[in-house]
Amino acid sequence: MDFAVRFEDVCRYYGKVRALDKVSFEVTDGEFFSMLGPSGSGKTTSLRLIAGFENATAGKIFIHGQEARDVPPYERNVNTVFQDYALFPHMTVLENVTYGLKVKGVDRKTYTRRANEMLALVKLEDMPARRPGQLSGGQRQRIALARALINEPRVLLLDEPLGALDLKLRKQMQVELKALQRQLGITFIYVTHDQDEALSMSDRLAVFRDGRIEQIDTPAAIYETPASRFVADFVGNANVLGKSLAVALTGVSQACAIRPEKLFFASGNASPDEDLVTAPGKVIDVHYHGASSRFTVEVGGGHQLILIQPNDENSRAAALTPDQSCVIAWRRKDAHYFAT
Amino acid sequence: MRSRSDSRSPLTLKLMALAGLLFLHIPFAFILLYAFSTEDKSYQFPPPGLTLRWFEVAFHRQDIWDAISLSLRAASVSTFIAILLGTLAAAAIYKRRFFGREAISLLIILPIALPGIITGIALRSAFNIGDIPFSFWTIVLGHATFCIVVVYNNALARFRRILPSQIEASMDLGANGFQTFRYIILPNIATALLAGGMLAFALSFDEVIVTTFTAGQQSTLPIWMLTELVRPRQRPVTNVVAVFIITVTFVPILVAYYFTRGSEHTEGSGK
Amino acid sequence: MPTISPPEDRTTHHAAGDRIPSLPPTSLVGRVSTFLYHHPLLLLLLFLIPPLLWLGVIYLGALGALLMQSFFSIDEFSGVINREFTLRTYVELFTPANMDIVLRTVLMAGAVTLASALIAFPIAYYMARYARGRVKALLYLAVMLPLWSSYLVRVYSWKLILAREGILNWAFAKLHLLWLMDAVLALPVVGGTSLSVSYLGTFLVFMYIWMPYMILPIQAALERVPVSLIEAASDLGARPGVAFRTVILPLAFPGVVAGSIFTFSLTLGDYIIPGIIGSSRFFIGQAVYSHQGLAGNIPLAAAFSVVPIVIMAFYLSAAKKLGAFDAL
């Protein structure tokens, strides 16, 4: 199996600071791989190591089977879309896009033709003579993409490329990037701190924390079966029940997490169901979010749980207001237990 | 700091500022005026008459042309050396911290920080000890040394404005170090180098304090002027030359200002 | 070059060996570039050595030569410089006549610095606080241009103005203020037969010439004071005068000190201005110039020039403590 990128016990230290601490993972050829985590967790550092802007302090990095230790960035068949796009302000759009081919000695006719193909691919055909300063944020982002893709890299690195765009544009670009990756079939390695983005776009994702990887898996697996409390908290919302609370409510003496949308309001009169766990509580807070509402409910012992319910005027939830008592319930199998 | 609440400044302040600025510039007007005076033995005001003939007289004086030629040649060579060395120094200093960095910055600034007479007498001492005769190159040696810092400052400021991501992007796309310098760095610093060069040229062309120590018997234009000031021959001719010097130095300054003013931000990068 | 094509075709283009991530450098330039990339220290040295060599050898070497010369002495009869270590020259430096010269220069430097600070401040204040856009650019240029344009021309222009038959006297005469002029000229020490041969004249010219050096750092320092500070002061009850004294002035002070470094140091070493406009009594610069000239007494000239270096060393360390270096 040809791995696009492989990290083997990679460490990156800056003096005492451990940006990456014995990190190992593999990225399959042709997959959309995301690296997710809070600031300073090591995801951008990993990206820069793959691109070649920095060297690992220890460990090995393989790009398509070849060790990348002493290879400078301009000799790697890897291209980057930078967070600030890094378009060259003193060149036109066309000159920016053709730069990679020009410096490798490709002739003018060929690189111009390829550039026009790229611009068509990112739907900016009528922009070649403009300067980056005249473009909008979304347009600059696409030019940065075209500039990288023209070199036919086997791995494309994207460093939080959508961070500066407004919400609507960001959602639109997420869809387009995913479609582009499928169409081109090349490996995308995508860094983001937005878990929503990572979940929706990736084939697999790695959750970083303090220079280590907490979990690598498909989005569904990470969401449904988080490996640790951190992952449960960072990816999506989670109600985390500590050991004592878990014992009190479910009878099982182990910490677990339950997603807010798996909790629901039950009537207090229903006959006890073996598959269901119920608990009486009081509504503390209700927040309206358009399609759904978010309830904060206090159960025994002062613990608060979050429920997310779709807004349906006929549902039991619709009638609830703060300070009312209620009964919450969930299916036993929806509680996910982890070792930590 | 801007005064937001009172956009109209107090009148006294305006007058004081205006008076100060006039103080700075009116003397130039007088130079211009006296270049046309018919009186050549004194600085009589108001001048008895106005004439253009001193321009013609100046045009025919060979000693003036020789001085101009020497000044231009010295300034050109010194500027070239200063651009080379100043840019190299700025490129070395601007990013990485290394042992001795601050000391080196100080060394570059020193020639212009210490009074000119120190630099002048120091060079003179060195020539004396080394038995080096005065020549064109002794002049250039002095000029280039204090012109380095002028180019260095401009280049340094511009280097600091280049975003690291630009250089990384260039390398990421396949350009090696030399190509990155040629296509990305050089276009970005070119106008700063030009501005520094213009300022260095003006500085060298005008310099007199250090030059009197390093020129020996030669006369650059400022040295010519100094001699005339001490022992005037035809006063209005000195004025004509002064007008010439003002024009020659004003122009590069204006151009340098124009070049460094515009690039406050780098377009096309970021949000 | 193959175009970007749908996934099914890619397998044929990307057979093993095609487009490997590590392409061997083919050109000499590429190899040199990679070598330098792996040895950044070497690259740094390559950059640093030419300017350091030049400055080290020429400038530091010259300063060393200067210092060396001050420890030599001149044989008064033959005029030959005796290249043996001695302190005789320094002893000669500390005679009352020579110390007079030093004192005169230092006092003048102090007076010029004080006066230019007072005059430059309103100008800088206006430029920083009230000028905007085009006006601001124009003002900046108006201050910059004299700074960079001919020093000699500017000195010379004052000779014209201050001459007995020049405009200043003419203006005073027209305004029937000649009595004032005579009274000023009659002042002891600073007066003289005409402005162009008096200390007062020298003082005026020094101030004029160094003015831009004082204006620009003050303006820069004032610009760094955020408007919100002044607004906060008035919000807390301070009247404009009080706000100025307690908020703006202390924050602008480092800029004043920075400017003073230039005016003081430049006055200390100047020999041209006192020679053209002023009495025939020497300043340090003139002493240096005359001693190294026909007399050939380079050791004494060197000893004299060590004085401003030492004075400036003290001045600079004091200025650094006052925060002037951050204002430059």
Image: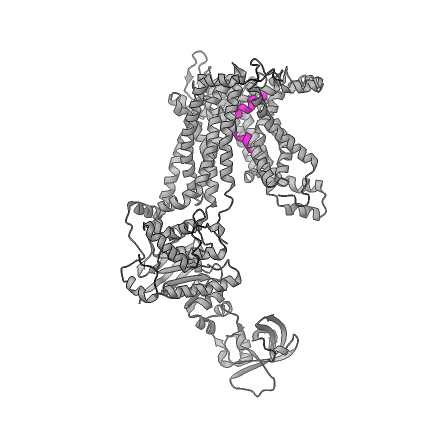
Up the image or down, C310 lies above or below B264; here it is above
- The residue nearer to you, when weighing C32 against C148, is C148
Residue at the extreme front: A126
Residue at the extreme top: C77
Q: Is residue C150 found inside the magenta-colored segment of the image?
A: yes
- The residue nearer to you, when weighing A255 against C22, is C22
The secondary structure that dominates the magenta segment is helix
Q: Position of residue C17 (x, y in %)?
A: 27, 59
Instruction: Tell me the quarter of the image containing the N terminus of chain C.
Output: bottom left
- Is any part of residue A241 visible from this angle? no
Q: Residue at the spot x=46%, y=74% of the render?
A: A225
> In the image, which residues are magenta?
C144-158
Q: Is residue C98 left or right of residue A128?
A: right
Q: Is residue B160 found inside the magenta-colored segment of the image?
A: no
Q: Residue at the spot x=33%, y=51% of the render?
A: A109
Instruction: Tell me the quarter of the image containing the C terminus of chain C.
Output: top right
Q: Position of residue C6 (x, y in %)?
A: 35, 65
- The residue nearer to you, when weighing A21 against B220, is B220
